[in-house]
Image (cartoon, grey):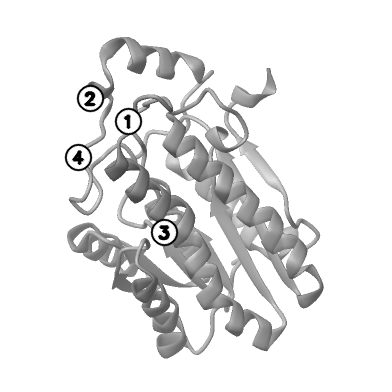
Amino acid sequence: MRLEGKVAVITGTGSGMGRAMANLFAKEGAKVVAAEWNKATLDAVVLEVKAAGGDIVGVQGDVSKRADDQRIIQTAIDTYGRIDILVNNAGIMDNMAAAGDFDEATLEKVMAVNSYGPLYLINAALPHFLGQNKGVIVNTASVAGVGGGAAGVVYTMSKHAAIGLTKNTAWMYAKKGIRCNAMAVGGVATGIMENTAGKVAAMDVTSIGPARAGEWASMAPAFGESMDIALCALYLASDESKFVNGAILNIDAGWTAA
């Protein structure tokens, strides 16, 4: 029960890492506010957690929209009276295009979800964290946020921004009892390559082309499971990491070690 009595908002809970986090955090005693744009998958994870005895409420929303982000945080306050943990996990991939080939729609959507969304959510949560002189933020970043060869230019930019957001927030609020860390995630089998909210064409590896897709897949030393990432998020969200702030934890099977 490492999160007993804590209220945790987790975005992107409909599948993959977010779903694993929702289940694990609830198992560890947290009251979970699960945020997801897809109502069907959101309802499924809420039922799943409740069936296991967890305390969870779902809220449908698009993290790229500031009004939705404010509503997500307010749901935690209205339902449980507080927020202790914010996990910015929702994210989408680009189409592996370089600077000479990117398209405007992908740029706008990927940056909005991966960069602006976490900022909006942190902004909405901060007044509550400051009011209680305590709060924890965990951002799901990527190996693409600490290097240049793991994705297309748009996704790489968005995850570098997530790293900057993490470090700046950690520094700015370190003396206010608020911690902010990020996970630089490597190859994990998740739904990130799926279409998001129907606003960007489906970005699966087949659209990248067999050669590019094979090259990308071969870079990762190994592919992890969603629970591998959820366990690291649990550590960063818990009091066990109370002296960890502004850190970028590489969870990548050694991808960035070279």
The tag on residue 23 is 3
Dot 2 or dot 4, earlier in sequence: 4
Discs 3, 1 touching: Cβ within 8 Å: no
Q: CA distance from mark 2 to mark 3?
A: 32 Å
The N terminus sits in image quarter? bottom right
Image quadrant in which you'd find residue 146: top right
Dot 2 or dot 1, earlier in sequence: 1
Q: CA distance from mark 2 to mark 4?
A: 10 Å
**Residue located farthest toward the top when viewing the structure as drawn:** 211
Q: Nearer the viewer, residue 177 or 124?
A: 124
Discs 2, 1 touching: Cβ within 8 Å: yes
**Mark 1 highlights which residue?**
95
Discs 1, 4 touching: Cβ within 8 Å: no
Dot 2 or dot 3, earlier in sequence: 3
Q: Residues within 10 Å of mark 3 (few under 14, many from 20)?
A: many
Q: Is residue 197 left or right of residue 95?
A: left
The tag on residue 201 is 4
Taking the spot 54% from the left edge, 45% from the top edge, the residue there is 141
Q: CA distance from mark 3 to mark 1?
A: 30 Å
At numbered mark 2, what does the secondary structure look like: helix, strand or loop? helix
Amino acid at the residue labelled 2: Ser
Taking the spot 44% from the left edge, 42% from the top edge, the residue there is 226
Q: Is residue 170 left or right of residue 42?
A: right
Discs 2, 4 touching: Cβ within 8 Å: yes
Q: Nearer the viewer, residue 68 or 253?
A: 68
Q: Would residue 140 be visible to someone looking at this image? A: yes
At numbered mark 1, what does the secondary structure look like: helix, strand or loop? loop
Taking the spot 59% from the left edge, 84% from the top edge, the residue there is 128
Dot 1 or dot 4, earlier in sequence: 1
